[in-house]
Image (spheres, rainbow, N blue to C red):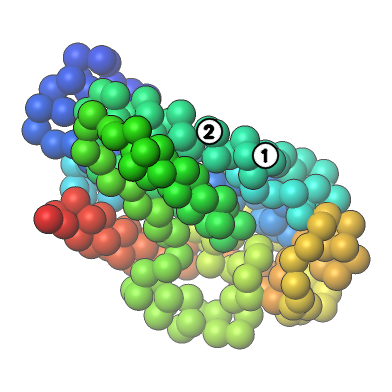
Amino acid sequence: MPRLQLSTWQEVDAYLLTRRDIIMPIGSTEQHGPNGLIGTDAICPEIIANGVAEKSGVMVGPTLSIGMAQHHMAFAGTITYRPQVLIETIKDVVASLTKHGFERIYFLNGHGGNIATITAAFSEIYTEASLKGSNRPFRLKLQSWFMGRRFRALSKELYGDSEGSHATPSEVSLSYYAFPEHVKRAEMSPKIAPRGVIRDADDYRRQFPDGRIGSDPSLSTVEHGERIYLASVEDVTEDLKAFVDEA
Ligand code: NI
């Protein structure tokens, strides 16, 4: 499986002679409730990207592990960018990759809060290409690892109404599968966390005192994580292939 971080420049040159696609995992560094790892949103797309690479031979770039986490800043350990900084980061990453000849750049996302800003970054990049003209053809795609049909069916089967939307048992299980030596146990009170609207950090902590939204991550296990991994790797492999084969 070709990983950019573990390749030499000659190996990247050779890869580019045969194909032009790359996956860039993108996540966040933010609290994930009483038993979830701070790195969950970066760990999940990274392990799935590596699984997709094993199946399909696509190259995987370094994980962009800081994203849009301002609403989690009332919890220790969270690191956030401002939207503008993430937009500029993605612009530079895309400009670097396209300069070398990558033409299909697939951002595999692990954090719902990143979607608006990554989409805005794509808009900036395409606008620049439209106004200035770009010397190389390229296409971008944003997909979140938890959007595929196999994964969604499985999470419904495993967790139903306990899935929620932040610090979900699905993402916590997947991170436990990646790092079984870091499984944590905690009592959840209430069992299923409240739901609500996301605004600023202090407001978030008032509404969601232990960090979870709508979820019961005490259901998380390494075994579930393995099933989630296999389902999502299949979902993403299929989606990546459609993107790469698109005329
Ligand atoms: Ni998350």
Residue 45 coordinates in the image, percent (x, y): 45, 50
Pick out the residue farthest to the left. Answer: 18
Quarter containing the N terminus: top left
Residue 132 is marked as none
Which residue occupies 48% across, 82% down?
Answer: 156
Residue that appears at 56% across and 50% down: 117
In the rendered image, residue 56, in percent from the top left (x then y), is placed at 19, 48
Judge from the rendering whether residue 129 lies leftward or rightward of residue 163; answer left or right.
left
> Which of the image's four quarters has the C terminus?
bottom left
Q: Is residue 211 above or below residue 29?
A: below
CB under 8 Å between discs 1 and 2: yes
Q: Secondary structure at mark 1?
A: loop
CA gap, disc 1 and disc 2: 10 Å
Q: Which mark is residue 81?
A: 1
Indicate the secondary structure of the residue bearing disc 2: helix
**Image spot of residue 59 (x, y percent):** 26, 36
In the orientation shown, which residue stands out farthest toward the front? 131
Image quarter of residue 154: bottom left
Where in the figure is residue 167, as x and y percent of width and height? Answer: 65, 63
Q: Amino acid at mark 2?
A: Thr
Q: Say which of 147 and 175 sits in front.
A: 147
Instruction: Check disc 2 and report the residue beneath it.
Output: 89
Q: Residue at x 53, y 67 (%)?
A: 170
